[in-house]
Image (cartoon, coloured by chain):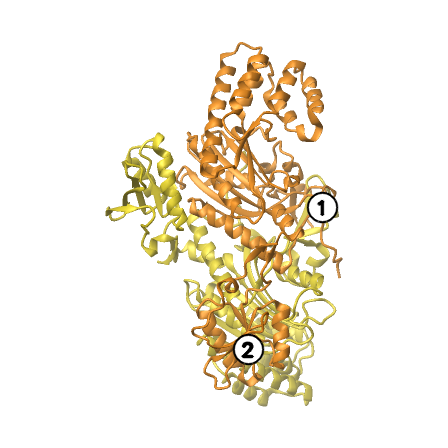
Chain colours: A yellow, B orange
Amino acid sequence: MARLAPLSGFPEWSPSERVVEASILHNLRTVFELHGFAEIDTRAVEPLERLGGASEASKEVYVLSRRGSDAAQAEFGLHFDLTVPFARYVEERQGQLAFPFRRYQIQKVWRGERPQDGRFREFYQADIDVVARDVLPAHLEAEVAVVMARALATLPIGRARMRINNRTLVEGFYRGVGITDVPAALRSVDKLGKIGADGVRRELAAQGVTDTAADAAVELAKITAADASFATAVLDLWETTATVADDQAQRLLGEGIASLTALVEAVNSAVPGTAFADLSIARGLDYYTGAVYETTLEGHEDLGSICSGGRYDSLVAGGGFPGVGMSIGVSRLVSRLVSQQLVTATRSVPSAVLVAVVSEDQRAASDAIAGRLRARGIACEVAPSAAKFGKQIQYADKRGIPFVWFPAADGTGDGDVKDIRSGEQVHADADAWVPPAADLKVRIQRR
Amino acid sequence: MARLAPLSGFPEWSPSERVVEASILHNLRTVFELHGFAEIDTRAVEPLERLGGASEASKEVYVLSRRGSDAAQAEFGLHFDLTVPFARYVEERQGQLAFPFRRYQIQKVWRGERPQDGRFREFYQADIDVVARDVLPAHLEAEVAVVMARALATLPIGRARMRINNRTLVEGFYRGVGITDVPAALRSVDKLGKIGADGVRRELAAQGVTDTAADAAVELAKITAADASFATAVLDLWETTATVADDQAQRLLGEGIASLTALVEAVNSAVPGTAFADLSIARGLDYYTGAVYETTLEGHEDLGSICSGGRYDSLVAGGGFPGVGMSIGVSRLVSRLVSQQLVTATRSVPSAVLVAVVSEDQRAASDAIAGRLRARGIACEVAPSAAKFGKQIQYADKRGIPFVWFPAADGTGDGDVKDIRSGEQVHADADAWVPPAADLKVRIQRR
């Protein structure tokens, strides 16, 4: 039959690795719901017209066609993020939803990236957004960041460092130093990490930006602080570089500084040590208009940003739906955790107990014991065959099941339960015995 | 921008409808895990060669191509069920898995059906399978059915009636009455509901089956019983219709009867009143070799089978991996539940409490109260604006949040909490107050 080589870019986990992924998804979900975010689940496909746009991802859409039909006539593609479908969902249901609408969404997305780039072509994203009608209160910029910081804090991996910038601040500053095409300049500065300061200067020069303005933009991007002190650095730089006497630039700069200060302080007050003002954060998308966020994990900076987002003027074309949202690239995280075995599952199967079978004609007695354990929430399975007990213990061991229950000969449901790791065996009642809390459910543990 | 009409065949739910779906998925998951099934999650795409085969679904594959590329060169398609990817998964990982391997899988599948047929083109399936090496113990046919019966019993909809047949029985019988192409005859009998007895007779005649043999096949398909009594009816029919003196036919019939008897009795002993022997159940796929199952819901027979499956000789081409599995078509169920409002969510948002905000400069006090409630697992959100309390109550009401917390002026975290449904208001401590159990989490309720 067909080739068996794993498909590059389409991650797939072993059962115990899936435990890690499922546990992470569960933790994210729990934090999102504690903060009042409701889940939605959208179809995987969108009309191709909706999958256009300027972002890199939109160039990498997988188009769907029925087998044997002509792809040129394809009308649908797989979504490449969860924002496009969310925007459509809100547009379709705006009459039914109560705003500000808080939603979370955890689904796979697809991007036809070149596999040689080592990127995933199918991966889970976990998004939260709050979308308002007409006016989005500023405190929601902090709230979304706080919820994500709390969600990331549940993960068994390095501390999250959230780097935050403000588009209004940057726009005011750029205008003040004489940069007129702010979005183009931002796209260049966004490449700072890739092409370096000189590369950025060259791109800005090509856009007609003066050398002193380009220098100022590069200097601005170097400012970072864990608190409000970034503001002094920005204002000092502004003093020496602003050339355009423009009230609006000044106003935008002031608003942006105030907004970023409040945001960094609010996030650090809720989750201390998380937020940093970082004036280099640009985010490629023109779409963002206020706060922009990127998040790295201590000790895993090479993963790049694993949780990004920002504030936007309207989710829906035509305006009127300002919002703020962030998105976690879950599969990249899971991949790091499992490939480096930073986290492992305590076992690969849900069963805490294997109920042994004395003989095939006494299987019903074992089934009954299993039923009594399950009625109390203890996951278990009955041995597949009435082999010698030694073989049944071996089977439990191979499956990673910690306890084996040996039914009493009298069919009462009593029996002996053996911890096959320690060899300890105790007499027990199927209506009363419980495994130690650490063994009841599969858990994940740090290495 | 693009059209907004919902895409036919791609269901999408409102937030409160999604609560129903998520709750059903959660219940299925819980039952599967209690029975020791481990979850796997496979990529959505498979090589096209693997998506071939004789089934209807394989003709309806969605092919994937990168935008701008040639669909004729497409190599991948979206999976149309969870069996094809599971087979590949087992084939790839056979060296690492412990057999019998018990897995569940809950994912979306895609089928490019014609939308006018009213079928879904994207839907959730929930599958369980047990796959063994070389030998699959017979009791697993019962176990899989019992697990599914217990899973379906958690759903807030009519009782499941599981109709079971046995391929070996049918093969023995068919051979005994002189039918040589058993798979072809089975495919015709499978259409009994669609084309009627005369239609089936015509198709069998076209296959060269004699009239008396065709009559016998149709009569066999009429036999149904809630217990072992089907065996007498089968043997009576055999007495009057078997024409071929064939030891093998007789042996297969005997084995099949014994196997189906044991299966129906085991399932009904575990979940009384669930299983019926129904000799009309054929299942289109040649693939099945032992038990075959279909399940309808009392009062919703028009949905057709919502949970089907069977026993097969090998999951993996080349043999050696016998298994048995069943699959629930979840979206069809959810669609029935929500479209007829048989079940509704108690609210559409996770929040049990809206913490009111006295004034914007006291927002931090409200955030602190929310934090103390969340620390005890109470989902809540803080009011988006410090509007008049009447407005904040209105907002909670529109969102469906049952309680509003009014912070005490002294910032202690005490305050008054109002049930906005009854108007009852009590003084409360944010470290101690709990909502009534029925209000703590969103639940689903029957109409």
For residue B199, side relative to residue A167 (left or right): right
Query: Quarter holding the C terminus of chain B?
Result: bottom right
Q: Secondary structure at mark 1?
A: helix
Toward the viewer: B433 or A119? B433
B19 up-or-down from B260: above or below = below
At 69% from the left and 45% from the top, the residue drawn is A65
Q: Label 1 near label 2: C-beta < 8 Å? A: no
Residue A360, quarter of picture: top left
Residue A250, quarter of picture: bottom right
Question: Badge 1 is on which residue?
Answer: A71
A83 up-or-down from A189: above or below = above
Residues at marks 2 and 1 on the same chain: yes
At 47% from the left and 50% from the top, the residue drawn is B30
Question: Badge 2 is on which residue?
Answer: A279
Q: Secondary structure at mark 2?
A: loop
Q: Chain of mark 1?
A: A
Toward the viewer: B169 or B48? B169
Query: Quarter holding the N terminus of chain B?
Result: bottom right
Q: How many marks?
A: 2
For residue A72, side relative to residue A270 (left or right): right
Which of pointers 2 and 1 lies earlier in the amino acid sequence?
1
Q: Which residue type carries mark 2?
A: Leu
Q: Which residue type carries mark 1?
A: Ala
Q: Chain of mark 2?
A: A
